[in-house]
Image (tube, rainbow, N blue to C red):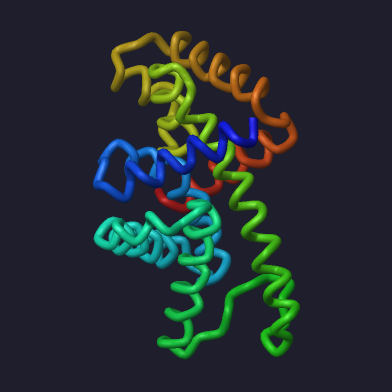
Amino acid sequence: MINNANSEEENLIFKFSIGDKEAFKSVFATFYAPLCFFAGKILGSPVAAEDLVMDVFTKIWQKKDDLKEINNISSFLYATVRNAGIDQLRKEKKQLFLEGSDENDELNINEVLEAEEIYAQLLAKVYEQIELLPPQCRLIFKMLFIEGQTTQQIAERLKLSVQSVRNQKTRAIDILKLKIDPNLLCIVLIHLANRSIHLH
């Protein structure tokens, strides 16, 4: 299993590095939101975090040839966002925005950052499973939990009954529960709901 996973990641990195747009979309869909969460913990601003992550993805795409030397794309992305976030704060002469950290204790800051990165990586695993949902399930799940639309709005937009939307929502959650620890899924759904509230 581990060898298969490594092989899949190597293949993804290779496709990304030669300009495969589908590979880029796959990486972006899996890591964008978790990286925004992680960057937000550093910068203290969801809007600034999204701008930073978009900038990181843009620069990575422009220098995609360099990815051929990368072994772990997840670690690479989090390290890049972490460094970019800290650099941005230094340029703006601001302090790290980290709950539970002491700005004068570098070791403590690193521990908090590592904890936030671990949680962000768990989010990435959830997003990866979301991308594997059946098409309509995935669309409705994203509209509900990521875009923050209501069941009624989705029904009208997709020309479906409200009950059909609810059924697809239930189906999506049931599928995800088979792949993800229910407690973790619950935490992520709460995170997504809060994020969609902040975006509106």
Image quadrant where residue 69 sits:
bottom left
Instruction: Residue at 54% x, 42% y: name it.
Output: 192
Q: Give the image location of residue 37, x and y in percent.
A: 53, 56
Q: How many marks?
A: 0
Reply above or below: 41 against 138. below
Reply above or below: 145 against 19. above
User: Is residue 91 found left or right of 191 in the rendered image?
Assistant: left
Image quadrant where residue 193 sits:
top right
Depth order, front residue of 143/115: 115
Instruction: Residue at 52% x, 63% y: name it.
Output: 40
Depth order, front residue of 66/152: 66
Reply above or below: 120 against 41. above
Reply above or below: 99 against 187. below
Q: Give the image location of residue 36, x and y in percent.
A: 47, 56
Image quadrant where residue 176 sits:
top right
Q: Give the image location of residue 197, x and y in percent.
A: 48, 47
Q: Give the image location of residue 49, x and y in percent.
A: 44, 63
Depth order, front residue of 70/25: 70
The image quadrant where one finds the N terminus is top right
User: Is residue 115 found left or right of 10 in the rendered image?
Assistant: right
Instruction: Residue at 55% x, 14% y: name it.
Output: 171
Instruction: Residue at 39% x, 66% y: name it.
Output: 52
User: Is residue 96 found left or right of 46 in the rendered image?
Assistant: right
